[in-house]
C-alpha cells in the first residue's frame, strides 16, 4: 500500500506535467498528493517544507545557479561559447564531437548551472538535424556522464567512503561504462547529426587549441578550485568571474545588466519547490522503508538493492540514496565489493536522469522549452539499455575479482 501511494504521487506529478504546467506547479502538486496520501500532519508538513526551503543546501543551489549563469552571460558577451564550438569544429571537423565532448567537458564543473553553458553549443552543432527534444536530452545526458564516476561529485565521495572501496579501483572500474554511455548516446541520437561541419580543414590546429583554452579556461579553473579546495560552487565562481572581468576588460556598463539577467525567477522557484518536495518525502519515511517493500521479491539481494537504488533515486535523488542505502547494502552483502558498488552507482546515475527531483532536468527543460515527460521519453531507450549492460558488467566484475 505504501509503495502504491508513492506511485500515485508520481502519477500526479506526471499528469500535471502532461498538462504543460511549469515544473514548480507539477512538483507542488506532488507535495499536496504526498500530504494527502500519507496523511501528513499539516503543521509538520509545513515545517518540513519550510526547513527545506530555507536550508543552506537550497541557498547554495540558488547561488550556484546565479553565479554560473552570470559567468555564462560573460562568456556569451565575448562570444567565447561560439569560439569554443568553432574551435572544436576546426580541431576535429566533426559536429558529433562538438555535440558529445563539449557538454562532457563542461559537465566536469560540479554545478547544475553548467548545463546552461553546454546547451547553446549543442544547439549550434545539432542545427535542424535533431529535434529540440533530442537536443535537450543530448545536452543534459553528456553533461552528466562525468557524474557517474568523477570524484569531484559529493555522491561519489560519499559512496566510496561508506562502502570502503578504493577510489582508484572504483574510477577505473567505471571507465568501461563511461564509454558505454558515450556509445549509447551516439547510437540513439548523435549519429543523426552529420559528421561534416561544412568548414575547411583547419590549417592552424595550435591556434584552435589556444582558442579552446581562451573560451573555456574560466570553467576549467572553477572546476580545479572546487576540486582542490572542496568549496561551494558560488565561492569558486566569484573569483573566477572577477578575474575574467579584468582579463577580458569588461566595463561597468557591460557588467551592470548581467546582475539582473543572471537571475531566473522561475528557476529559483522550481529549486525551492523541489527541495520542499524532497523534505516532505523524507518526512514520510518512505525511503527508509523501500528495502522492506522489495525484500519480498524472489530475487538475489544485489538485484533488490539495484531496484531500491533505481526507484529510490527517482524519488529522493542520488545523494540521499547513497547516504541511506549504501551502508545497508554492504551490511547485507558484505562480499559485494567493487562489483556491488558499480552496480548500485550505475543504477543511481541512470535513475537520476529521469528524476523530477534532479534540478538540472528542470533547468534544461525550461531552457529548451520542452516538457519533463518529453525528456523522460527521450531517456528511456538509453536507460533500459544501460541498466541491462551495467548488470551484466557488474556480474562479470564480481566473477573476475
Image (spheres, rainbow, N blue to C red):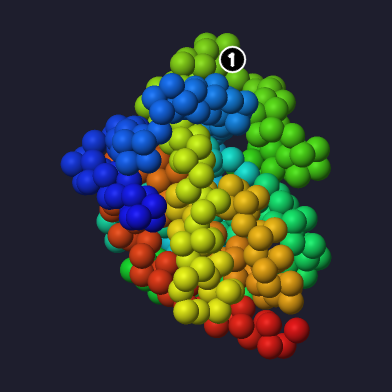
Residue at position x 67%, y 25% in the image: 238
Residue 345 locus on image (x, y percent):
60, 63
Residue shown at 77% from the left, 39% from the top: 230
Q: Is residue 68 left or right of residue 220?
A: left
In this rendering, is residue 266 above or below 86? above
> Which residue is at the far bottom?
399
Q: Which residue is mark 1?
A: 251
Judging depth in this view, the residue of 395 and 305 nearest the camera is: 305
Q: Position of residue 130 (x, y in %)?
A: 30, 59
- Residue for point 74% across, 76% down: 335
- Seen in the picture, residue 385 relative to 126 is either above or below; the reply is below
For this rendering, which residue is in front, 302 or 158?
Answer: 302
Answer left or right for 370 relative to 322: left
Quadrant for the C terminus in the image: bottom right
In this figure, what is the number of numbered marks? 1
Q: Residue furthest left?
A: 19
Classify mark 1: helix, strand or loop. loop
**Which residue is more in the foreground, 280 or 355?**
280
Name the residue: 77% across, 55% down. 161
Asked whether, in this view, residue 247 is left or right of residue 37, the answer is: right
Which residue occupies the foreground of this view, 328 or 398?
328
In the picture, the quarter occupied by the N terminus is bottom left
Amino acid at each position: 500500500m505504501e509503495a502504491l501511494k508513492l506511485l500515485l504521487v508520481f502519477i500526479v506529478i506526471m499528469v500535471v506535467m502532461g498538462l504543460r504546467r511549469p515544473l514548480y506547479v507539477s512538483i507542488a502538486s506532488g507535495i499536496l498528493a504526498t500530504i494527502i496520501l500519507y496523511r501528513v500532519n499539516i503543521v509538520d508538513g509545513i515545517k518540513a517544507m519550510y526547513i527545506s526551503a530555507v536550508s543552506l543546501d537550497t541557498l547554495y543551489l540558488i547561488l550556484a545557479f546565479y553565479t554560473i549563469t552570470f559567468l555564462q552571460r560573460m562568456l556569451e558577451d565575448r562570444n567565447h561559447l561560439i569560439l569554443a564550438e568553432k574551435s572544436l569544429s576546426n580541431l576535429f571537423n566533426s559536429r558529433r564531437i562538438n555535440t558529445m565532448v563539449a557538454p562532457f567537458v563542461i559537465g566536469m564543473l560540479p554545478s547544475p548551472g553548467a548545463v546552461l553553458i553546454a546547451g547553446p553549443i549543442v544547439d549550434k552543432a545539432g542545427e535542424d538535424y535533431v529535434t529540440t527534444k533530442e537536443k535537450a536530452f543530448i545536452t543534459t545526458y553528456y553533461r552528466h556522464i562525468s557524474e557517474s564516476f568523477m570524484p569531484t561529485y559529493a555522491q561519489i565521495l560519499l559512496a566510496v567512503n561508506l562502502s570502503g572501496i578504493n577510489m582508484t579501483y572504483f574510477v577505473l572500474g567505471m571507465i568501461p561504462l563511461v564509454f558505454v554511455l558515450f556509445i549509447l548516446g551516439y547510437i540513439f541520437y548523435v549519429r543523426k547529426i552529420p559528421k561534416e561541419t561544412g568548414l575547411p580543414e583547419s590549417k592552424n590546429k595550435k591556434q584552435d587549441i589556444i582558442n579552446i583554452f581562451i573560451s573555456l579556461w574560466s570553467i576549467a579553473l572553477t572546476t580545479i578550485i572546487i576540486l582542490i579546495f572542496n568549496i561551494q560552487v558560488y565561492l569558486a565562481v566569484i573569483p573566477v568571474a572577477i578575474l575574467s572581468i579584468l582579463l577580458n576588460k569588461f566595463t561597468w556598463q557591460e557588467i551592470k545588466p548581467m546582475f539582473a539577467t543572471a537571475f531566473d525567477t522561475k528557476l529559483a522557484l522550481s529549486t525551492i519547490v523541489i527541495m520542499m518536495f524532497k523534505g516532505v518525502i523524507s518526512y514520510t519515511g518512505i525511503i527508509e522503508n523501500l528495502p522492506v517493500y522489495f525484500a519480498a521479491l524472489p530475487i538475489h539481494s544485489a538485484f533488490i538493492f539495484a531496484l531500491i537504488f533505481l526507484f529510490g533515486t527517482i524519488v529522493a535523488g542520488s545523494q540521499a540514496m547513497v547516504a541511506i542505502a549504501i551502508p545497508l547494502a554492504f551490511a547485507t552483502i558484505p562480499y559485494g565489493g567493487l562489483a556491488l558498488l558499480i552496480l548500485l552507482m550505475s543504477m543511481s546515475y541512470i535513475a537520476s536522469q529521469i528524476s523530477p527531483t534532479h534540478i538540472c532536468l528542470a533547468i534544461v527543460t525550461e531552457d529548451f522549452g520542452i516538457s519533463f515527460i518529453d525528456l523522460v521519453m527521450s531517456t528511456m531507450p538509453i536507460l533500459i539499455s544501460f541498466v541491462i549492460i551495467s548488470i551484466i558488467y557488474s556480474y562479470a566484475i564480481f566473477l573476475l575479482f
